[in-house]
């Protein structure tokens, strides 16, 4: 998989443990929960999915297979919505 990064038209606002992603081109808002915000922060810092998985396992009470599947689905949905792009 090529490196991932936030799409250029996305603004990110954190509110306590949740955040909003705003597509400034379309005006569409996306709300992220605490875990989504944690993952988005790591993605915006250039972390790979493998590194993010390790961070999830060290910060949250979750088993590796569940975390890996959830992370894959989350990244796929971000890509599908145009919030995340592959370089």
Image: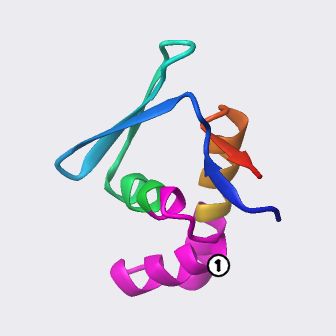
At which x and y percent is residue 59? Answer: 35, 80
**Residue farthest to the top?**
26
**Residue farthest to the left?**
16
At which x and y percent is residue 76? Answer: 70, 49
At which x and y percent is residue 41? Answer: 42, 58
Q: Main secondary structure of the magenta part?
A: helix
Give the extent of the magenta segment.
42-70
Q: Quadrant of residue 84?
A: top right
What residue do we see at 53% from left, 60% from top? 43
Reading the image, the residue beneath label 1 is 50
What residue do we see at 49% from left, 19% from top? 24
- Please state if 33 lies on the left or on the right of 63 as rendered: left
The stretch drawn in magenta includes residue 12: no
Q: Residue 83 or 80: which is nearer the viewer? A: 83
Q: Residue 3 or 30: which is nearer the viewer? A: 3
Residue 21 to residue 44: above or below: above
Q: What's the coloring here?
A: rainbow
Residue 55 to residue 12: above or below: below
What residue do we see at 62% from left, 43% from top? 78
Q: Quadrant of residue 61?
A: bottom left
Q: Quadrant of the N terminus?
A: bottom right
Dot 1: few (<14), some (14–19), or many (≥20) neighbours within 10 Å? few
Q: Quadrant of residue 56?
A: bottom left
SS assignment at label 1: helix
The stretch drawn in magenta includes residue 51: yes
What residue do we see at 59% from left, 63% from top? 71
């Amino acid at each position: 998989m090529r490196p991932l990064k936030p799409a250029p038209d996305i603004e990110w606002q954190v509110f306590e443990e949740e955040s909003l992603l705003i597509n400034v081109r379309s005006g569409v808002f996306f709300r992220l929960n605490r875990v989504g915000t944690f993952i988005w922060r790591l993605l915006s810092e250039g972390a790979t999915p493998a590194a993010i998985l390790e961070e999830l396992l060290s910060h949250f009470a979750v088993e590796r297979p569940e975390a890996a599947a959830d992370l894959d689905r989350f990244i796929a949905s971000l890509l599908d919505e145009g919030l995340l792009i592959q370089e």
